[in-house]
Amino acid sequence: MVTSIDIPTSSSSGMSPFVLYRRLQQTAEKNAGSAKESSTQDALAKQLLDIKNMQIRIRNVQVKADNALAVSDATYVQNRMNSATTVNELVNDDRVLKVLANAFGVSDLYSFNKQRLKDVLLSDLSDPNSVARRGTTKELELARKFDLGATGSLTDTNGNAVTIDGNGKVRNDGTGTPLEAGLAKIKNLVINNSGQVALNSDGSLLTSGNLPNATANAYTKAKTKTPEKEQTLPASNASKVYEFDGPEFQRFRSRADIQREEEYFKANVKSIKSVDDFFADKRIMRFVLSAYDLESELPNTGKIRKIMESNLSDVDSLANRFQDARFKQLAQDLDFFGSKVSKLTSQTVVDNIVTKYERLKYEQSLDEQAPGVRAAIEFKRRAKDVTQTVQLLGDSVLREVVTVANNIPKQIAVQEVSSQITALERKVDVAKFKDSSEVDKMVIRYLNNKAAETSGGTGNYLLNLFG
């Protein structure tokens, strides 16, 4: 293996940039295989989930229809009870029987023995041999709730006949027809111990509660179903695979200094209540900026605050005016403009910042071991997105790689942009960056020349060995 060969080094840490880069690429290839396998599994899981969610949607259509019918039934029976003038018109209404049975726990009677349901409702509760008195507890409760089997006519406490008009309204003014005793509870009348209807101080009939409304509510509660929520896949394992994850990365992220900063951030970020709080806690601010590779901007608090509070929908906002994508990503992820600090303190964003911090710090440490490795990694990642030569000049990392790889003097930067583009295009064809092998060649030349800057010739040895 490449990593087992004893090769002259070109950095003070004792590690060749080329060897370290090759080692990292081996790790990345291994992780890519794991990510591909995870992606295949995710695709299959998504197909199965789509089928399951389709079934849920079909069931929910039926649930919605059933719920609408339940509301319709409840409303119908509520109105029917309010307007009823006789007991028979209620017990002979199939829809009323359905609602009463389901609302009060005897749905089996409606489904399998409607005659018994009617007999229960019409039971004379003073008769110990009545169906309700000899039935189940639920049957007796139902009979007592409505007492439709009560007989005789009603009078109020002054001896006036209680009557009912054609709209189902009860009266005691001598008009209407006598009210059946079996309708007293449905009409919410209060009956005293003498079997008479109690009166209000103004002589009107005393009522209490609202049995029709309670019946409707009980029925809708019993029959209404909650639509099932469609399911979502857990976060893809493939999307979480870090290309350089391995023993070395895990050892790095376990370092005491890294853990100390992470623990402080996680323990204190939830106490941030305002944007002012964020900028007042320099340690948290440093941690966040470091996660976005912007730690060098820490002294520029005013600039960073304006960027983080930028309205990204405004093309003239400061975050949008910067060419450096890191600033825009920071403003977008935390959204101080629209969300204040609510995003910053959310667990998802906290976890994301910690992950970014670990990976960036690790890659910075690679560059400390072997200068140039981090630029090579970034070039490998981003070169495929380059479509114009000018993009190479406007990006410090891309510019570093292509100029060093092609032995283009740094002094070219003082020339006009058009002259720089012409000089660069003599040696670099950005169209070739779509081919990963061409990108690898550029990276190899860069690392070789970068090593040669300080090794006095070691770079040529590496190129011969690995080129």
Image (tube, rainbow, N blue to C red):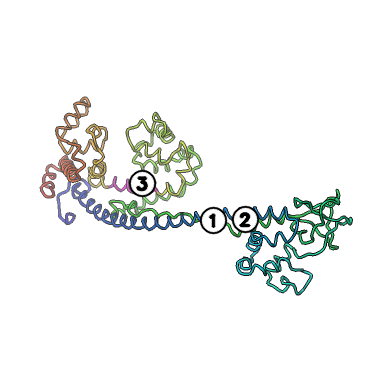
Please check the rendered image and state whether residue 287 is part of the magenta-colored stretch, yes or no. no
Residue under the point 39% across and 48% down: 352
Q: Which mark is residue 357?
A: 3
Alpha-carbon neighbours of circle 2 within 10 Å: few (<14), some, or many (≥20)? some
Q: Label 1, label 2: how many angstroms apart (C-alpha)?
A: 18 Å
Q: Nearer the viewer, residue 307 or 239?
A: 239
Which percent across, then down, holds residue 288? Answer: 40, 42
Q: Nearer the viewer, residue 145 or 7?
A: 145
SS assignment at label 1: loop
Q: Using residue 341 as the reference point, say whether residue 203 is left or right of it.
A: right
Which of discs 3 and 2 lies nearer the camera? The answer is: 2
Name the amino acid type tagged 3: Tyr
Which residue is denoted by mark 2 in the rendering? 73
Name the amino acid type tagged 2: Asp
**Circles 3 and 2: CB atoms closer than 8 Å:** no
Per the picture, the main secondary structure of the magenta-coloured stretch is helix
The magenta stretch is 352-365
Q: Label 1, label 3: how many angstroms apart (C-alpha)?
A: 43 Å
